[in-house]
Image (cartoon, coloured by chain):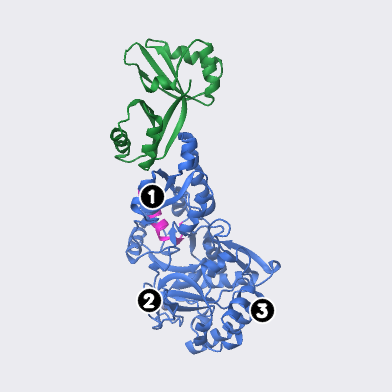
Chain colours: A green, B blue
């Protein structure tokens, strides 16, 4: 049920994000969704892509620092309160969220929220118990 | 005024005779008390008895900073710890710093020598000295402090930092003399101006400045910012501290080296060959009177030129020009001497960074600023590539640099390509 996210270290200087996206384009990699975490000095680009292994390989070969991170994707109806219903459960079960980002499915019906948890296994168990739709990696990559 | 008229104006022949006598004594002493010298003289097939003139000095092997490091911490001390009353040290981690020791008599000698420097700058009992050299492990602040008290002058032991407070005291206490690094003096002038203080209206009349490379252009800037006469003082922590050489009030013509306590030579830094007086080269010092930590033919790394012509002030001691460059990669940052290899040693201990790094040194206003660019390690990032982990590394680097080297860099994590493209470990954008 887990999803693999690619994290890329980006130096805070002009052109570093463009360099990463160029490598992905040249290798015909599709980005499903992404988010960028920034500090004063550096950024970390988080990507959900159609081919995790290939992305990992081509970025590394281009000299980037890359890591694969386990995240959890949850599908919710794209309507008010969608995210809140999940947060309520996580809070009650004392599951800590490190960060999250979201995107809307092509159909426009549902939103997918990507969570990074300290303990993904435990989180998945809790989410399933409360009848949330956890999207497996294989499905997400091919969205 | 001359503090020690007898020794500071000793005719050169008598001075040289005194040097030879003291050199022979110090050689006997180190040969019999410091294992290192016995070994190095034996290896060079020289006995202390072979040294009969100053010219024989060049038969003796050099001692280098690396030798000091190899004997960390106490390997070169010539007296037992029971005779030592003070320890100073250079910045750096274990095995990458040097420790300097002093007996009670060494402190007295040092005090007398800094007193000479201060009197040469025209100080007397009525002066008040604002001493902004760092008090601590580095010998700058304390070394001058003792000399100032010795000549009966008041001293404000400011040390460095707390700039706003310093400016308040410069106004309230009305010190007449400023002791600091040249860049800190300029920083005080800038900050004072920003606070709306007319720095020219202070009581200051003379500055005793040193501890870093500086030029006459900087001297002009300081003199006009404060309306003072700025004099250059020279010292080496390895050779006791400040007080080894000082400009007299006939200033801007080089610093008198206290030749009754030190022998200075100039050598070609490439070949080690002794150069005639007056040629530019690396200065090599031999201490003649130090008890705890005598050094014979210590290569200072400072490039300068000796001025053999007599000085109008009456002192017979030879002068050296200001040091404008180094023979090695030593960097002086806010008065603190560091070597790139020390930075490397710190980074090596930190998990998650690759060995490549780059130091970028520049000025922000009058003060040195350091950016330390460090490459994120591949393994570390692939295992824990999170913002938090990376920020933790940044903090650790800043802390270790501060703790071990007393330098507070801005740390910037960079991608591997960045450092490879430039290839330089140090980029010094400062002009002196
Ligand atoms: Zn003079």
Q: Position of residue B278 (x, y in %)?
A: 38, 80
Q: Is residue A137 above or below residue B327?
A: above
What range is drawn magenta here?
B174-193
In reply to whether residue B176 is colored magenta, the answer given is yes
Q: Tell which of B188 and B382 is nearer to you.
A: B382
Q: Is disc 2 in the same subunit as disc 3? A: yes
Residue B124, magenta (yes or no): no
Q: Which residue is mark 2?
A: B280
Which chain's residue wears label 3? Answer: B
- Look at the numbered discs 1 and 2 and tell me whether their residues touch, using CB distance below 8 Å: no
Which residue lies under the disc numbered 3? Answer: B32
Disc number lying in front (2 or 3): 3
Quarter containing ligand 1? bottom left
Q: Earlier in the sequence, mark 3 or mark 1?
A: 3
Residue A100 is tagged as none
Residue named by callout 1? B191
- Relative placement, left or right, of A21 versus B51 is left
């Amino acid at each position: 049920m887990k999803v693999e996210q690619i994290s890329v270290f980006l130096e805070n200087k002009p052109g570093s994000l463009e360099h990463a996206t160029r490598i992905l384009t040249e290798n015909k990699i599709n980005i499903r969704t992404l988010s960028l975490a920034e500090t004063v000095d550096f950024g970390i680009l988080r990507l959900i892509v159609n081919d995790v292994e290939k992305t990992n390989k081509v970025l590394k070969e281009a000299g980037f620092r890359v890591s694969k991170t386990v995240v959890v994707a949850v599908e919710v109806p794209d309507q008010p309160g969608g995210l809140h219903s999940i947060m309520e459960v996580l809070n009650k079960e004392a599951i800590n969220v490190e960060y999250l980002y979201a995107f809307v499915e092509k159909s426009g019906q549902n939103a997918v929220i990507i969570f990074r948890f300290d303990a993904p296994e435990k989180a998945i168990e809790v989410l399933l118990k409360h009848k949330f739709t956890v999207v497996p990696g294989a499905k997400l990559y091919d969205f | 005024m001359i503090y020690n008229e007898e020794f500071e104006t000793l005719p050169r022949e008598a001075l040289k005779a005194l040097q030879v006598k003291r050199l022979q004594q110090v050689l006997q002493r180190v040969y019999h008390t410091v294992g290192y010298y016995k070994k190095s003289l034996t290896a060079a097939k020289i006995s202390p008895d072979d040294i009969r003139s100053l010219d024989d000095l060049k038969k003796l092997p050099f001692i280098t900073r690396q030798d000091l490091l190899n004997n960390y911490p106490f390997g070169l001390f010539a007296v037992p710890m029971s005779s030592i009353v003070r320890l100073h040290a250079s910045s750096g981690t274990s095995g990458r710093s040097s420790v300097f020791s002093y007996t009670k008599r060494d402190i007295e000698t040092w005090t007398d020598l800094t007193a000479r420097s201060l009197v040469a700058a025209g100080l007397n009992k009525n002066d008040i000295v604002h001493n902004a050299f760092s008090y601590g492990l580095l010998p700058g602040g304390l070394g001058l402090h003792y000399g100032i008290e010795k000549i009966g002058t008041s001293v404000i032991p400011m040390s460095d930092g707390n700039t706003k407070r310093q400016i308040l005291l410069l106004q309230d206490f009305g010190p007449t003399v400023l002791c600091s690094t040249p860049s800190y003096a300029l920083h005080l002038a800038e900050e004072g101006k920003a606070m709306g203080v007319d720095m020219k209206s202070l009581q200051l009349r003379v500055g005793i400045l040193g501890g870093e490379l500086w030029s006459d252009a900087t001297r002009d800037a300081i003199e006009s910012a404060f309306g003072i006469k700025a004099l250059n003082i020279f010292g080496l922590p390895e050779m006791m501290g400040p007080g080894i050489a000082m400009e007299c009030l006939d200033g801007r013509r080089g610093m008198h080296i206290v030749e009754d306590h030190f022998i200075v030579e100039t050598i070609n830094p490439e070949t080690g060959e002794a150069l005639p007086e007056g040629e530019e080269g690396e200065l090599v010092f031999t201490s003649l009177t130090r008890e705890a930590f005598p050094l014979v033919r210590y290569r200072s790394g400072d490039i300068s030129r000796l001025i053999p012509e007599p000085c109008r002030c009456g002192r017979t001691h030879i002068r050296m020009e200001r040091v404008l460059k180094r023979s090695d990669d030593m960097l002086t940052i806010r008065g603190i001497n560091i070597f790139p290899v020390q930075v490397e040693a710190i980074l090596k201990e930190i998990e998650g960074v690759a060995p490549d790094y780059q130091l970028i040194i520049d000025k922000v206003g009058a003060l040195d600023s350091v950016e330390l660019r460090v490459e994120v390690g591949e393994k570390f990032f692939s295992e824990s590539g999170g913002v938090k982990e990376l920020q933790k590394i940044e903090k650790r680097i800043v802390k270790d640099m501060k703790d071990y080297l007393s330098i507070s860099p801005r740390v910037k994590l960079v991608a591997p390509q960045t450092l490879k493209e430039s290839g330089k470990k140090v980029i010094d954008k400062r002009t002196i």
